[in-house]
Amino acid sequence: MLTPPSDIHPEKGVVTQLRAYLAQSDLAEDGRLPPERELASALGVSRAELRKALDVLEAEGQLWRHVGKGTFMGSRPLDTFADIAALARRSNPAEVMRARIAMEPEITRAAAFTATPADISEMRLCLARSRQAETWRQYEGWDTRLHRTIAEATQNSLLLGLFDTLNAVRRAVTWGRLRSVPVRPLPSHHSFAEHEAIVDAIEHRDMAGAASAMRAHLMTVERKLMEKQMRAAGEG
Amino acid sequence: MLTPPSDIHPEKGVVTQLRAYLAQSDLAEDGRLPPERELASALGVSRAELRKALDVLEAEGQLWRHVGKGTFMGSRPLDTFADIAALARRSNPAEVMRARIAMEPEITRAAAFTATPADISEMRLCLARSRQAETWRQYEGWDTRLHRTIAEATQNSLLLGLFDTLNAVRRAVTWGRLRSVPVRPLPSHHSFAEHEAIVDAIEHRDMAGAASAMRAHLMTVERKLMEKQMRAAGEG
DNA sequence: GTTGGATACCAATTTATCTTTGGTTTATAT
DNA sequence: ATATAAACCAAAGATAAATTGGTATCCAAC
């Protein structure tokens, strides 16, 4: 219907009018249509009424909208950003910690099923080295390697890739932290026993135990991290 | 020249001076050292000479530089893009399925804690649309959107990014598949009820239930996929 | 009392502008 | 010849301004 008949309710008229506009006007390549304010005046309707029509078309899945970006035809493109730097920019330490708590226990569970004796002996090596570390920097190196060895033990290149991505973002995001204590990690450091419990569970093919041990470990890390942050906030 | 040691070659002198500076001065946590112009004046040498010394240390791998960014200690962070194509090449449908089973239930668990009413109503929309789908292509579109909406509902950009990566690999890996049956999804399709159970659990903030519902769903998908593969192998 | 329209404001996003930074060239002086 | 200073370039970051969808408010009309 090109000329809106007067016997149709105005709301429906706007929807029809909008459909006609979208059908005829060839919009930009990205399917973007003009801003609401322009489109409203171009169609000779108020912005509120145009928005109601847009709501209808959006509910139909014909278009999608986003604040600051615009309104687009077709289905929403999944803006896949696999770029580490971009991910790190948008994320923060809290998110990273939550992501670790979500991912790593399940990775550990899978590893408990697939780990080879070679994997497990490499984990044991990481454990021993981390205990011998004389600086926090060294300790962190062995800690990182232990966690990655577990991911490798899943024998799943995709899971390993996802873990690496998570880890890269973690390093990028955690910059700006302060290692206040220059001393070496103490033997009583909580991670030692926790790490050992994880590797033990993997060795015993205890999938549930491995997952929960990793989860417990990461939640301790998260708690320590939050405590440190609270202290820093209190001091500042 | 403030105190030029005559017995040392000036170039080597700058290198030594620079090494000493890097050893003593604790630079920022990201390992960044001051811009060349500042550092040159701080060390009392010309910028050109400082750059020569920096060239030496860079050749030794002790530091890395980047225009517009600065000069940094340590090894250059592997400019990792989680290369979807590379991941897909190394992976296979079975790995993808195992990775989904590892990740998505935990994402769903997190979503059950953080989902907003808007998130949930969007999930319901996806459910309804997927039921109305008249082709498998349409159905897959709404299925994908449902799963991504759940990932969005975690309010965690990193988890969302990891999910997107996983999803991109999945599409890349499943590329060569053929949807043999041109008929529309039947109302008895297993996913309908399973999807609904997932969204219900999220709506009721049942984190454990949401996770296990998603896990059950994905395991059904995996089973169907294996059966199909067996049939294909039998036919081939 | 409800509806529709105009306006103003908000937050997310993009665009434009300026600054910083490593890399390079040129001219000058010792 | 060599070193120094200066100037310029392109890449990256930082900041400011403009856009845009979303929302609330007020007012007039029926």
Image: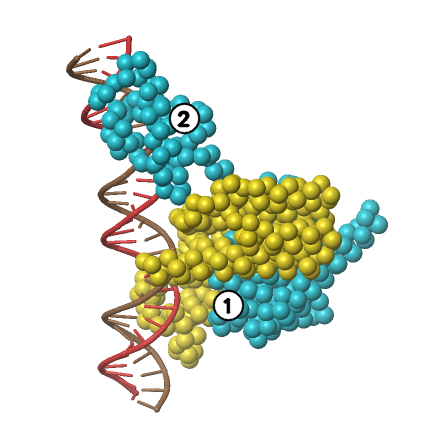
Chain colours: A yellow, B cyan, C brown, D red
**Which residue, given by chain and number where applicable, does mark 2 sit on?**
B57
Q: Nearer the viewer, residue D7 or B30?
A: B30
> Is A155 rendered above or below residue A15?
above
Q: Secondary structure at mark 2?
A: helix
| Residue that extends furthest to the front in the rendered view of this protein | A187
Q: Chain of mark 2?
A: B
Q: Measuring from the top left, give residue B136's x and y in whole percent.
A: 65, 60
> Is A138 rendered above or below residue B179?
above
Which residue sits at x=64%, y=41%?
Answer: A125
Say which quadrant the N terminus of chain B sits in.
top left
Q: Nearer the viewer, mark 1 or mark 2?
A: 2
CA gap between label 1 and label 2 equals 49 Å
> Is C17 rendered above or below residue B222?
above
Can you see residue B197? yes
Left or right: residue B142 compared with residue C9: right
Can you see residue B87? no
Amino acid found under the numbered disc labelled 2? Leu
**Which residue, given by chain and number where applicable, does mark 1 sit on?**
B114
